[in-house]
Amino acid sequence: MTRPGTGAPTDAWAFLLPPGWARFPVGERSGDTRTGAVYRPTEPVAGMVVPASIIEVELFGAVGLGPGDVATRVARGPFAVGRSVDLDGRPGARMVRNVHDVHREGGRPARSTREVTYVVSRDEAAGDWLVLTFGTSWDSPGTERLAETLVEFFDAVMATFRWTGPGSGTLNLPERNVPGSA
C-alpha cells in the first residue's frame, strides 16, 4: 500500500515466481497490520499439487522493534532459527519454525509444517515492515524431502526481491515478476 505523498523507494516491491503461481489479494488493513495477499501454486508440477503458499503481511507503526520481534508478533509465536539478511539494501531477518501436529505410534508426527519468514524494514523511523511467510507441509520422509526443496525454492524467490518504488533505482526484473501490494 503506497501512502499518499511519501514516494519512498520502499513503497513498492516485486519478486519472481515461476509460471503456475498466482497472487490473491486478501484482507483489509486492521489496526496496524494488513494482510496483503496469498500466493499459491495454481498448476500441478509433474502431476502433483505443490503443498506451499506465501503470505504477505505489512506491519505499520512498530517503532523500536527488531526483525525477530516483528516476525514473532505477526506469526503469533516464536521461531526456532533466525539470521540477519539484506533484502535489496534494507535490513531484515530470515526466521524458520517447524510445527509438528498429532503424533502417531513411534513418535513420528502425522503432519508437520515448516514456515520460513522474511522480515524486512520498509521505514525504520516509522516502524513499517514487510513480512513474507512461506509455508509447506509434509507427512512422510519422502514429502519431507520435498518440503526441504520447496524451502530452497522460496529462498531463491527471495533472492530476486527488489524494491520498485519511486527512486529505488531497481534493476529491471524479467517479465515474470509478481508485484507486491506495497
Image (cartoon, grey):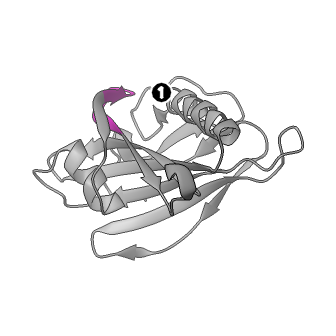
Q: Which residue is drawn at 51% across and 30% down?
A: 155
Write down the quadrant of residue 19 in the picture. top right
| Residues shaded magenta | 85-95
Q: Position of residue 131 (x, y in %)?
A: 39, 50
Label 1, secondary structure: give it. loop
Q: Where is residue 55 in the image (x, y as percent from the top left)?
A: 51, 56
**133 vs 48, nearest the viewer:** 48
91 falls in the magenta region? yes
Whether residue 109 can be seen here: no
Question: Is 153 placed above or below 182 here?
Answer: above
**95 vs 164, nearest the viewer:** 95
Q: Which residue is drawn at 44% across and 54% down?
A: 99
Left or right relative to 16: residue 131: left
> Main SS of the magenta segment?
strand
Q: What residue type is labelled 1?
A: Thr
Which residue is tagged 1? Answer: 170
Residue closest to the far top: 171
Q: Residue at x 33, y 26 (%)?
A: 89
31 falls in the magenta region? no
Left or right relative to 72: residue 135: right
Question: Is 39 placed above or below 120 here?
Answer: below
